[in-house]
Image: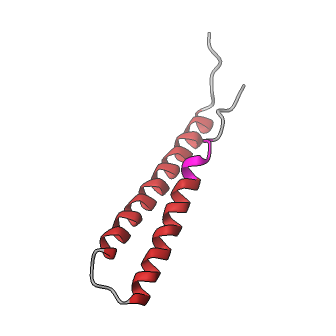
Amino acid sequence: MPPRIPIVVVQKRITMIDERQARQRAHSNNIERYRRLLQTLLSDVEHQFIERRLAEEQAALTKLAGQNPSPAPSF
């Protein structure tokens, strides 16, 4: 019979994956929004601000994508 994994551990792992996916989706949505904003008429200050925010969101998404998910617990 295979070892049984406590439900609490499985639920915690699923929650962590869900949170990770939600953060990735939020960064992706922000990136798309900033790209659309850059296609509009903006002042130089607004354009610089949006470009800076876009770079920050892209860096955050890259960092998140590079992180390994937590290893599965071993029993």
- Farthest-out residue, front: 44
Q: How is the image coloured?
A: secondary structure
Residue 72 position by quadrant: top right
Q: Is residue 66 above or below residue 52?
A: above
- Farthest-out residue, top: 1
Q: Work out whether residue 23 or residue 36 is closer to the camera in this orientation and state it.
A: 36
Q: Work out whether residue 58 or residue 2 is closer to the camera in this orientation and state it.
A: 58
Q: Position of residue 65 (x, y in %)?
A: 54, 48
Q: Is residue 71 above or below residue 23?
A: above
Residue at horizontal 42 percent and vertical 55 percent from the top? 25
Image quadrant where one finds the N terminus: top right
Q: Work out whether residue 3 or residue 18 is closer to the camera in this orientation and state it.
A: 18
- Farthest-out residue, right: 75
Q: Position of residue 32 (x, y in %)?
A: 35, 63
Apparent side of residue 44 relative to residue 20 in the rendered image (left or right): left
Q: Is residue 12 above or below residue 36?
A: above
Residue at horizontal 71 percent and vertical 27 percent from the top? 74
Q: Position of residue 16 (x, y in %)?
A: 56, 47
> Does the magenta portion include 37?
no
Residue at horizontal 56 percent and vertical 53 percent from the top? 64
Residue 54 position by quadrant: bottom left
Residue at horizontal 58 percent and vertical 40 percent from the top? 13
Q: Which range of residues does the magenta coloring cover?
A: 64-69
> Does the magenta portion include 66?
yes
